[in-house]
Image (spheres, coloured by chain):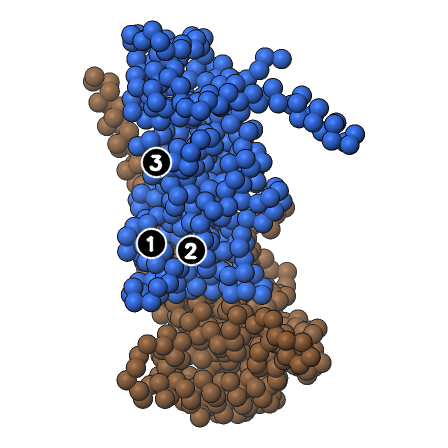
Amino acid sequence: MKKTILLSVLILVSLPCYMVRAADAPQNLAIRAGRIWTVTDGVIEDGVIIIKNGKIQTVRKKPDIPAEIEVLDFSDKDVIPGLIDAHCHLGLSLDIFGEIDETVSAVTPDMQIIDAFSPLADGVKRALSSGVTTVLLAPGNKNPIAGQTAVVKLYGQKAKDRVLKRTAGVKFSLRDEALMSDRRPTSRSGLLALIREELGNAKAYQDDKPDLRMKVLKSVVDANFPVYISAYTVDEITSALTLVDEYDLNAVLVGAEQGDEIAGLIAERNIPVIYSPLLLFSRDKDLKRVVRLAENGVKVAFSSSAPETALSDLRTSSITAVKYGLDKETALKSLTINAAEILGVSKRIGSIRRGKDADLVILNGDPLQPTSTVEMVIINGNIVYQRQKI
Amino acid sequence: MKACVILLSFLLLMPASAEEGQPEITAVKAGKILTISGAPIADGIILIKDGKITDIGTGIEIPENAFVIDAGQKIVMPGLVDASAVPPVRGDLNEQSEEITPTFRISTALDSQSKALKRMVQTGITTLYVSPGLRNVIAGLGAVIKPTGKTPEEMIIKEDAALMVVMSMDSAYGNRIPRSQPPYNFYYRRPTTRMAIIWMLRKNFFDTQEYAKSNEKDDPDLEILASALDDKIPVRLNVRRAINIRTALKLAEEYDFQLILDECTEGYKVAKEIAEKKIPVILGPFYYYPRNLGQYEGRDINWNNAGILTKAGVKVALTSGAQTQSIDLLTAAAFAVRHGMPQDEALKAVTITPAEILGVVDKVGTLEKGKDADILILSGDPLKVTTRIEQVILNGKTVYKAERGRKL
């Protein structure tokens, strides 16, 4: 009993930090901002964003604001689009040390990650407080053909507001983690052979016998359904490129830590990269790699790969990349529009533009300065996070 | 505007001038060149262009713009060919979920960033054969590679160089038979004995013969085995004991495939028979005390295995040893000489002979016109323990230079 009281007191004390003002219906708002980083249309100084029915209606310097609309005054603050974490395992396990792979079978393309996602998962609130509004959910790296990814927002009253893509692609893993001593494959060559076998079977598959796994893989080899290939080292990436060439896959590389070594080969195939969280590295040599990758013309997005790093660390990755020489424009793009384009949701999110979803983050300074803090986060026109002054 | 144009043209010219800065032709001058293919050349010169040797001999005129590597009185020899090196592959070298995996290609898993490749270059190896591991009866296809390049395509010089077949006990150890408890994974399987290994081989070769007769051509495994029985791919049989070597020779005759003996620890016992059938031998590592196999397969080691086989007329290649890498290749040759192998034969056993056995002798193994410019510069006699490798040239480019205190 005593414990319960203590716990509830603790919860009550901690609540105000995450004071979420969730309305039943999206509000109509006008935001007066010192700087609007539209990402695709440059920076607008002293502008106003008008939000209607959860969408951005107007982004301009001095629009006429209808009288009935509530105006939030952030005239000394910066507004950016909601940040997109292009690869994470959020909400897949009950706790942070839980399993994110279904390792009983090595090939599970029919498994849909969206079924496991809980909007109340650990870390969602912290992610919101750091400006992340949309994530790609993916299974882990232990299955060569792991399952279908999904793109979801971290807030939404209804599933249609929250889920951008129920299935965004199939996750493949070419990493050493996919090898196990008591399950096929046990070796790297065997791993590739297994994927080739499955894709070959999918090509030959006719719809006569219903087979969910083959149906999904058929859409990969025949209908350009995207594949997210997890590959870190040079040899893993070259293997991925061979698969892309052989089966004409619509591929996205996940991880691609050493991708800069063969950046030319990635760039000439127009394969985008969802880069590993930079917080995992400590050597200068490794931290510079993403910069070289982007400079060689590869489209890059960042990820937290949560629970490897916290979702709230996403912005830190791009700030670190800027420190190591990435130009600021690319860094901001890689957190927003690049990620949206890679995930195939750029029609709805990724920049501040008329008609797009009103997913906005308000900071008290330059978004690529580590000292800037998130003041407010808006998803679909709802204020879902507001920083409390202590 | 004008300044801009000048700057632009300057920028455009820059890469071109950088290319011109690197001379097309490299010349290596040395006091003694061991060509291996012929007699040593005193005060010789090697000309290299586009990674190939364009000329070799004495009194060759060096073009004016050539980049000259003057080795002084040092000794120059061809880059070493290791017919059984540690594959630069992470993780398991076998796909253990089955015991017959002919389509398993180790080359699909090559890791160009492997530190092992760097170390190999430092010991003078410029060409190596990489093979699947020894855990499967028919383990798969090996490839000949060079320790250079970033993608497998850049590294491989011969794909499907041999089909690895394992007759030594490695392919049976670890397999289990379900007795009291039910089987729960794929290690509960055959073979568990020597006789079952050979039975499985026979069965597969028989199936292949039947497959070759039939009209159906849809089994990728049997396709590979069929091309092995057609002599398109040599069969490399890993054997240690004399009894297995004899069985290997018999199988080769029975099914008529091109045999290469691998490891061959007790080869000296059957040297005559191997020589009669003209079967080449790739010897295993020298300091080889297989602990878990010792009782059965490593008991009868003869330090002069290489010498006895050579004397009997067998084509012998020395290796650093894929499974243990206990020794570097030049030291292995020196070791063989110490125990009775003739000097010139030992040098051939790490250069031209493995190149011949691997089927890449048109590219590597000797210093001859038209071959790849894989060259070692040594401080002295290659078979002396005190000699060190000063410089390694691979495809005409210097890839290693000895420095004092350099970390390996």
Mark 1: amino acid:
Val
Labels 3 and 1: the sequence-earlier one: 1
Q: Indicate the position of residue B368 as horizontal and vertical percent values.
A: 37, 66
Q: Mark 1 lies on which chain?
A: A
Q: Name which residue lies at 59% across and 70% down.
A: B185
The colour of chain A is blue
Left or right of B64? Residue A387 is: right
Q: Distance between the residues labelled 2 and 3?
A: 22 Å
Q: Indicate the position of residue A9 as horizontal and vertical percent values.
A: 71, 24
Q: Indicate the position of residue B282 as horizontal and vertical percent values.
A: 52, 76
The residue indicated by pointer 2 is A109
State if disc 2 and disc 1 touch (CB < 8 Å). yes
At numbered mark 2, what does the secondary structure look like: helix, strand or loop?
loop
Left or right of A321? Residue A202 is: left
Q: How far apart are marks 3 and 1 (CA)?
A: 19 Å
Are the residues flagged by discs 3 and 1 from a single subunit? Answer: yes
Q: In this view, does B283 lie above or below A170?
A: below
Q: Which chain is brown?
A: B
Labels 2 and 3: the sequence-earlier one: 2
Q: Which of B392 and A63 is in front in this view?
A: A63
